[in-house]
Amino acid sequence: MTQLIWRANVKTHTVTTEPIPESWQSLAGRALIPRILLDEIPPMCEPLGPFNKLLFTPGFLVGQMLSSCDRISVGGKSPLTGGVKEANAGGTTGLKMVYLGIKALIVEGAPADDGWWTLYLNKDGGRFDPADDVAGLGIDAAGAKLREKYGSNVAISLIGPAGEMLMASAGIQNLDKDGFPTRIAARGGLGALMGSKRLKAIIFDADGLKAPPLADPDLYKAARKGFMTSLLAHPQTKVYTDYGTIAVAELAQSFGAVPVNNFSAGQFEHLEKINGDTLRDTILARGGDGDTSHACMPGCVIRSSNCFPNAEGERVVSPLEYETIGLVGTNLGLDSLDAIAALNREMSDVGVDTIEVGAALGVAADAGLMEFGDAERALELVKEIRKGTPLGRILGQGAGMVGKVYGVLRVPVVKNQAISAYDPRALKGTGITYATSPQGADHTCGLTIRAKVDHLDPTDGQVEASIAGQLNTAGFDTLGACMFSGFGYSTAPPDTIRGLVKGQHGIDLGDTPLQTLGRAALKLEREFNKAAGFSAADDRLPEWMTLEALPPTNAVFDVPDEDLDTLFDKVFS
Amino acid sequence: MKVKVRLHATLRKMMPDGPQNRLTLDLPDTATVAELLQALEISASPDHVMALIGNRRVEPDHPLTDGTEVQLFPPISGG
């Protein structure tokens, strides 16, 4: 299939295709999103209004079932931050989009009525089907019903009740390789943007289609071999296969960077009850549906996802990740994997970002709405979101909104997006990433925990570590590559990424493709945010983090403002 | 001198007596982190291990002292 731009208008219920504009051809995934936004929407527009557009675009490497490289980027102007937003996810959406020949799907316009719709796309084009029968359903039930209607071979992107209620913590879920709607493009409220278009789901039916031909099969296959050999041999691959992301919990604890009780401490007394060893041992002991090494995308050999079962071995939630255990566990004073998994399940089913809502609950606890350590009350509060009560709607708007409504100053957000499970006072390079990333606070935009620096010393190479992380991750997001694929790319022969992209598309990205793509993405994102009204004042951590010492390191965030203000001069020079 | 060691994730199952999280080793008074790793038969390559004492990472040439607790992590870079 020829790769084209597909455009779906939610007012006229039409789907059209058009050639890819020249300036979009050398971009994909994360880097293509701000280019389209700059070209097609007024940067100052209301994120939930008629002028914003919802974008889906697979990264450059998507479509060949190359291990860990089939991620889908979803984007738009963020309902949470008001700036550029790209949130990516695994699953099968990206793969099916490439099979359908969709370089980017642009969902635009203002809905003509209050009905709910499903956008169905196949090789013949697209149509809008009434979806009032799935409106209001949670992610699990809606996903099952949609698969029943459209078949088990389609990819689906869908929203839960939180997205329907236009909550800024709402994400967009995608089917994993087993057909479960578990892979969420979580951050920045893109589920609310989809809800504003009155779309409950998008179906990607690639029946009878396959991957497009390679531009240079020999070059591609040689590069693929180099990548796969390195990925399988890298020791980090084995760690993530056995433990997944939770392996990092004890490292974050040792650096004093675990979020505890709404970011009031950096070490959690009971971490051993919920750390990587305990999670792995619990899953193995319970058996049944439990899985310590689950692939979220077909063909992934890292398999860092998991499935957490209850005591009877029945599936509770998949995946259970470190960031959720951090924000929903330690950050709320909870030391029970079962309690955290129950909260995770409810959040996933209502369709929200566990980081954002975990942080919102932490602020809510400081406001007196729950006690830290009270799992039952935490679950009650999350259920308010599904009910759409005033309290639920406040929580569903994220940590920043809870702080404003209840007068709490200890709110862990940057650009109104919640800080994830690495306290920036004890990991200062990561704090620089949180402050300066055009995406808002997001560890996946440049986590520095493995950098060879003294994480407590603001002058010890923190800016350089953040820049390297931001460029690499923006590059991976543009390739559609999971950041863990970096285990393979970092040790693969030179020109591996260059060979893969050139072999697949015939596009030569030069000697430093990852950085070239990363720089392009960041430059366009900064340009969009500036046009949307962002300034240096938005590139700051919350003031309280510069004043309130974090036990036990007693660190505050003390990176000079000048370092934050000049970071992108260094990136673009 | 005696040095306490805490092993994390995949490193715990590399121990000769089966999976262990914590152990205490007798090492010469001049021992460094590299010699501790050698005693445990763990590669000192940063691709294989990261060592922390207290809240800070330490390099293989870092000298050890009696009673110190060293935490050893396999390669982990976040989630």
Image (cartoon, rainbow, N blue to C red):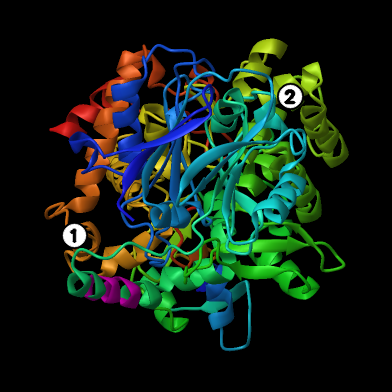
Q: Is residue A573 left or right of residue A371?
A: left
Q: Quadrant of the N terminus of chain A?
A: bottom left
What segment is highlighted magenta in the picture? A222-229
- Using the rendered image of the protein, determine whether residue A305 is visible from the camera's viewpoint: yes
- Using the rendered image of the protein, determine whether residue B32 is visible from the camera's viewpoint: no
Viewer-nearest of labels 1 and 2? 1
Q: Is residue A130 magenta?
A: no
Tell me the chain of label 2: A
Residue A59: x and y, percent? Answer: 35, 49
Q: Is residue A248 left or right of residue A462?
A: right
Looking at the image, residue A196 lies above or below residue A302: above
Residue sitting at x 28%, y 34%:
A522
Residue sitting at x 69%, y 49%:
A146
Q: Is residue A21 left or right of residue B47?
A: left
Q: Earlier in the sequence, mark 1 or mark 2?
A: 2
Q: Nearer the viewer, residue A97 or A361?
A: A97
Numbered label attached to residue A364? 2
For the residues labelled 1 and 2, the Cα–Cα distance comes to 50 Å
Residue sitting at x 41%, y 57%:
A99
Q: Secondary structure at mark 2?
A: helix
* Amino acid residing under circle 2: Ala
Q: Nearer the viewer, residue A294 or A234?
A: A294
Magenta: main secondary structure equals helix
Instruction: State which quadrant residue A40 falls in.
Output: top left
Numbered label attached to residue A502? 1
Q: Quadrant of the C terminus of chain A?
A: top left
* Amino acid residing under circle 1: Lys
Q: Nearer the viewer, residue B56 or A420?
A: A420
Q: Is residue A228 magenta?
A: yes
Residue A123: x and y, percent? Answer: 45, 52
Q: Secondary structure at mark 1?
A: helix
